[in-house]
Image (cartoon, rainbow, N blue to C red):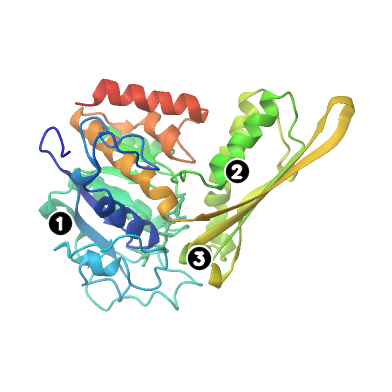
Amino acid sequence: MKSRNNDKIRLAVVGVGNCTSSLIQGIEYYKNARKDDFVPGVMHVDFGGYHIDDIEVVAAFDVDEKKVGKDLAEAIYAEPNNTTVFAQVPPTGITVRKGKVLDGVAKYTADVVPISKQKEVDVVKVLRESGAEAVINFLPVGSQQATEFYAQAAIDAGCGFINCIPVFIASNDAWAEKFKTAGLPVIGDDIKAQVGATITHRTLVNLFLDRGMKIERTYQLNTGGNTDFMNMLERDRLASKKLSKTKSVTSMIEARGQHIDEENIHVGPSDYVPWQKDNKVCFLRIESKHFGDVPMNLELRLSVEDSPNSAGVAIDSIRCMKLALNNKLSGAIIEPAAYFQKHPPKQIEDREARQLVEDFIATYGN
Ligand SMILES: NC(=O)c1ccc[n+]([C@@H]2O[C@H](COP(=O)([O-])OP(=O)(O)OC[C@H]3O[C@@H](n4cnc5c(N)ncnc54)[C@H](O)[C@@H]3O)[C@@H](O)[C@H]2O)c1
């Protein structure tokens, strides 16, 4: 099926890394999905009147000389991108433009991300000329200035903003207010993968709480071999990532009136293992006591391909953004953020959040 409105979702992407590669490949891979097909990782093929194939990328920004100036379909496969290739995307006619570098490239990634010598474009002008109505942010962790720059550019160009990284925009009151004042929606922050470490950790914590157990100690250690993990070797860039991932778990504990001391929870990226490429491995442990104060613990190892794991979630976030734009919603959009993002303005338990997204589609969809 095509959009019931013959209406496209005109999207600009910021950062043509592994996540954008999986997103663009996914749009190609599922372009002919039928309404009743099962597509893993998206809630519906027809999402409020919009098909996966209704997402049309109209602008793309990066700074890497191996990507800038290339057709988006070529850039998504360029090194250091190393995620699984599951679709061959034909030329898109969209050339990757050089955005503003700022703090996007850092200590550990500088060697593998050579900065293009091309002139930086006027991002607001490119957004306006492309007719983009939404911008999705996939910059490296710790890109505080660059994310704020692109968020402001989205506002100046009259676009909604989907922030998939742990720099706080939708969950920052001042930024949410800026979008509200501009009459534009913002969804964020820090995308939650389909079945990744965060959702697995939240679910297991809820299982323990449901069964009357106290979470005494827990950790979630993650390793991977993509540039995301390479970049996160720089601990100074990690503060908001750690906070976002930790809050995602502690909010479940606090919602049940329990508490866990800071020294008893450790959640975060732990190491870069080059040969793992885009495979991410999560080691998770929960320590508790059951009846009679008898100690017990749970250990789990989860192995996932990192980038496709969030691409379906990105596709649904983009379609929620379109419904928000169609209905002139502005400021932080709570329901999709709670379901799709790790650090939303308001944390809501996942099953309830999913139902709220269904209600959102029923209210605002076509
Ligand atoms: N994979 C997941 O499931 C997942 C989940 C949550 C959050 N994230 C976040 O999504 C983000 C993207 O992840 P990724 O694996 O695609 O990372 P990546 O390193 O592969 O991609 C980042 C891209 O941004 C580009 N870039 C750097 N500075 C730039 C600038 N100033 N302007 C434009 N482009 C710039 C880089 O050249 C690179 O192409 C990361 O912050 C990651 O933590 C991913």
Task: Report if residue 247 is visible in the image.
Answer: no
Q: Which residue is mark 1?
A: 125
What amino acid is labelled 1 in the image?
Lys
N-term mark: 3 or 1: 1
Q: Whole-Å distance between the Cαs marked 1 and 2?
A: 38 Å
Q: Secondary structure at mark 1?
A: helix
What amino acid is labelled 2 in the image?
Thr
Residue 341 is tagged as none
| Marks 3 & 1, CB-CB < 8 Å contact | no
Q: Whole-Å distance between the Cαs marked 3 and 1?
A: 30 Å
Q: Secondary structure at mark 2?
A: helix
Q: Which residue is mark 3?
A: 231
| Horizontal side, residue 48 vs residue 108: left or right | left
Q: Is mark 3 within 8 Å of ligand 1?
A: yes
Q: Residue at x 73, y 38 (%)?
A: 261
Ligand 1 positioned in quadrant: bottom left
Q: Residue at x 44, y 34 (%)?
A: 339
N-term mark: 2 or 3: 3
Q: Which residue is mark 2?
A: 246
Q: Quadrant of the C terminus?
A: top left
Task: Find residue 167 and report its horizontal and vertical position in percent.
Answer: 45, 49
Task: Find residue 321 and report its horizontal and vertical position in percent.
Answer: 27, 37
Of residues 211 and 129, the one nearer the viewer is: 211
Of residues 185 and 338, the one nearer the viewer is: 338
Q: Residues within 10 Å of mark 1 (few under 14, many from 20)?
A: few
